[in-house]
Amino acid sequence: MHDENARPENARPENAAHAAEAEERWGDTEAWRESRRRTKRYSPREWDAIKAEGAANEASFATLLRTGARPTDEKAMDLAEAARRHIDRWFYECSPEMHVNLAGLYESDPRFRAHYDDHEPGLARFVAEAIRANALR
């Protein structure tokens, strides 16, 4: 539900289609409205920081998976919490319950799944399970 495609430099046809689909899917939610309010004022420098922070989190998840960690390990749950706070800080209020809902998308939506699994096969499931474990602690 992050609306990074709203940036002018990202106004490519595939991003426009993604943004339209996201708005159709979530446009009636408060989270969507809050994300739009926040993201339209971000500078290119802030967007770079947002992307770098997210990429670092995903790379750390991939490292954990490669080294045989379990999604219920403390480090994995800490990364899940960092990911939740990233969304909460930059896009919209993201409760642990909402984060669990997003975890379902990471597994069920082919584009979300590919985004994670392109880093490391099985990463989407690992991240989703870590998010669920984090919400329970």
Image: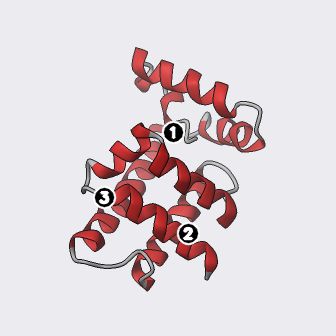
Question: Could you tell me which residue is drawn at 26 percent across and 47 percent down?
Answer: 118
Q: What element carries label 1?
A: loop
Does residue 85 appear to the left or right of 68 in the view shown?
A: right
Q: Is mark 2 on a helix, strand or loop?
A: helix
Check residue 2 in the rendering and tell me which mark sits there, or answer none: none
Amino acid identity at mark 1: Ser
Amino acid identity at mark 3: Gly
Q: Quadrant of the C terminus?
A: bottom right
Give the x, y percent position of residue 86.
54, 59
Q: Earlier in the sequence, mark 1 or mark 2?
A: 1
User: Badge 1: how crowded within 10 Å, few (<14), some, or many (20+)?
Assistant: few
Give the x, y percent position of residue 49.
42, 52
Q: Nearer the viewer, residue 59 or 136?
A: 136
* Separation of marks 1 and 3 at Cα, in angstroms: 34 Å
Q: Which of marks 1 and 3 is nearer the N terminus?
A: 1
Q: Mark 2 points at which residue?
A: 132
Q: Name the residue under label 1.
A: 43
Does residue 45 appear to the left or right of 99 in the view shown?
A: left
Q: In this view, does 57 lie above or below 109?
A: below
Question: Could you tell me which residue is drawn at 31 percent across and 58 percent down?
Answer: 122
The part of the image, by quadrant, that contains residue 11 is top left
* Separation of marks 2 and 3 at Cα, in angstroms: 16 Å
Q: Is mark 3 on a helix, strand or loop?
A: loop
The part of the image, by quadrant, that contains residue 136 is bottom right
User: Badge 2: how crowded within 10 Å, few (<14), some, or many (20+)?
Assistant: many
User: Badge 3: how crowded within 10 Å, few (<14), some, or many (20+)?
Assistant: some
Q: Name the residue under label 3.
A: 122
**Mark 1 or 2: the one toward you:** 2
